[in-house]
Image (tube, rainbow, N blue to C red):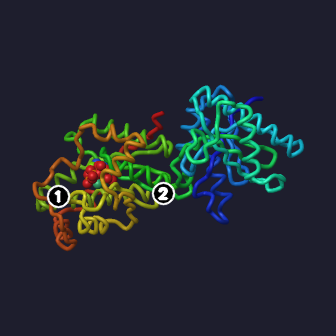
Amino acid sequence: MEQKTYIVRCGEVALKGMNKPYFERMLVDRIRRSLKKIGSGIEVRRDEGLIFVRTPLELEEEVTLKAITKVFGVASVSPAVEIDIEEGSAQDILDKIGAAAVDYMMNLIEKRGIKTFKVDAKRANKQFPVQSPEIGRIIGASVLKGCKVLAVDVHNPDCKLFVHVRRGKAYVFEQKVSGFGGLPLGTNGKGMVLLSGGIDSPVAAFMMAKRGMMIEAIHFHSYPYTSERAWEKVQDLASIVANYCGRFTIHSINLLPIQEAIVANCPEDEITILVRRFMMRLAERVAQETGCLMLITGENIGQVASQTAEALVVTDASVQMPVMRPLIAMDKVDIMDIAKEIGTYETSILPYEDCCTVFLPKHPSTKPKLPRILESESHLDVDALVEAALESRTSTVIYPQE
Ligand code: ATP
Ligand code: MG
């Protein structure tokens, strides 16, 4: 049966010493799951440091590439022509590869009008008696003979033709489509992301998932000050994140009673930082209950009043659980670039209200001190407020958008 073949390179997974088989198995499993959504009869196999995907001919290349490249742990993918070289003399085998290379290039001439090329050969099977540079020269000569319009250009070719000779099979291919790299999902526990409707937190979730962490999310609203539409926006954002990290649960909590208690009992300039400490406490409680090991936020040092160094210290002091802030040292433009790349940006910038914009102080404290904040909190029944807020929790399963 004729099939399309794809060579998948594993980025960092390839560096994992003793644990390499575990990471590779996880990666194969993730690729299989992603491909299962686009069709049947797809085969995914590991073979000496690479992963080979074989699909039915009718499955579109673009769709397959997309499904593979969005899997964390994939460094790059190449659609390739696979040549069976199980039998025959070295000469026969090189003739066979040469013929396949000619067909491949004819197709590129027709499709893209390429005029120059260069062969890059690699011999993974060291038992094959012809060395890589010689393989390159022989296949280059075959292509020149079979495709009269082509010339060799070693410096700036229109097409770099890769030839890989492995045990029993050889491959010719041209492009390498980049993946995200990272590590396969599920290799690094689960984290609770505080997901707002903004630009940053979906990117933070994506970045932790990219390192193999499963995601669960919590969102705070101030209904009726925040609308149903704002909550829908958050769910839309979550489902885009789920395209990469798979289905996950988002917990939603009404923060309004806490905000009102703070406004009524504490200094105005401390409202934001006090609210943030409650968010953390609530997130930690739900995280503990759902098996999350850490909290994840989209905070970024110096971005706003609540994210100065002093404010972050005071925020952290409200919880025991480690708080991951993958965007901490990034510039906003770079965060925005990632948001655009993963497809969350357009939804993030939709203008719906967030609970943080309700009761915004005119002059928020940028250098809060913990003793003063604790003093302000002593005017609140923190435990009772937390318990009551947890009562308002609803949990929704978010499915990938695509
Ligand atoms: P973002 O673009 O993620 O909204 P931001 O720059 O607007 O970030 P803040 O509003 O100060 O920053 O929030 C900082 C972080 O706190 C967010 O990245 C998110 O992790 C968390 N957060 C803020 N608002 C909410 C909310 N309504 N629900 C859940 N988490 C929130
Ligand atoms: Mg925000």
**Residue at which label 2 appears:** 291
Q: Residue 165, percent across and down?
A: 76, 48
For residue 153, what is the image quadrant? top right
- Judge the density around disc 1: few (<14), some (14-19), many (≥20) Cα neighbours within 10 Å: many
Instruction: Look at 36% across and 47% down and name the residue there.
Output: 337
Q: Residue at x 20, y 74 (%)?
A: 371
Element on which disc 1 rests: helix
Closer-to-camera residue (301/279): 301
Query: In the picture shown, does residue 386 fall above or below 61?
Result: below
Who comes first in sequence, dot 1 or dot 2? 1
Residue 314 % position (x, y)? 26, 68
Q: Residue 57: where, in percent of width, then height?
A: 68, 28
Q: Which residue is drawn at 48% across and 33% down?
A: 402
Outermost bottom residue: 371
Instruction: Tell me if I can see residue 149 in this picture.
Output: yes
Q: How far apart, in angstroms, are the residues tagged by discs 1 and 2? A: 30 Å
* Residue 289 placement (x, y as % from top left): 44, 56
Relative to 106, say whether 371 is above or below.
below
Quarter of the figure with residue 108: top right
Q: Can residue 388 be seen in this view?
A: no
At horizontal 47% and vertical 45% (from top left) the residue drawn is 248
Name the mark nearer the viewer: 1 or 2. Answer: 1
Judge the density around disc 2: few (<14), some (14-19), many (≥20) Cα neighbours within 10 Å.
Answer: few
User: Which quadrant does the N terminus fall into?
Assistant: top right
Q: Are marks 1 and 2 in contact (CB under 8 Å)?
A: no
Q: Which amino acid does label 1 sit on?
A: Ile
- In the rendered structure, which amino acid carries the disc numbered 2? Gly
In the rendered image, which residue does mark 1 sit on?
271
Q: Which of 263 and 110 is in front in this view?
A: 110
- Judged left or right of residue 227, residue 335 is right
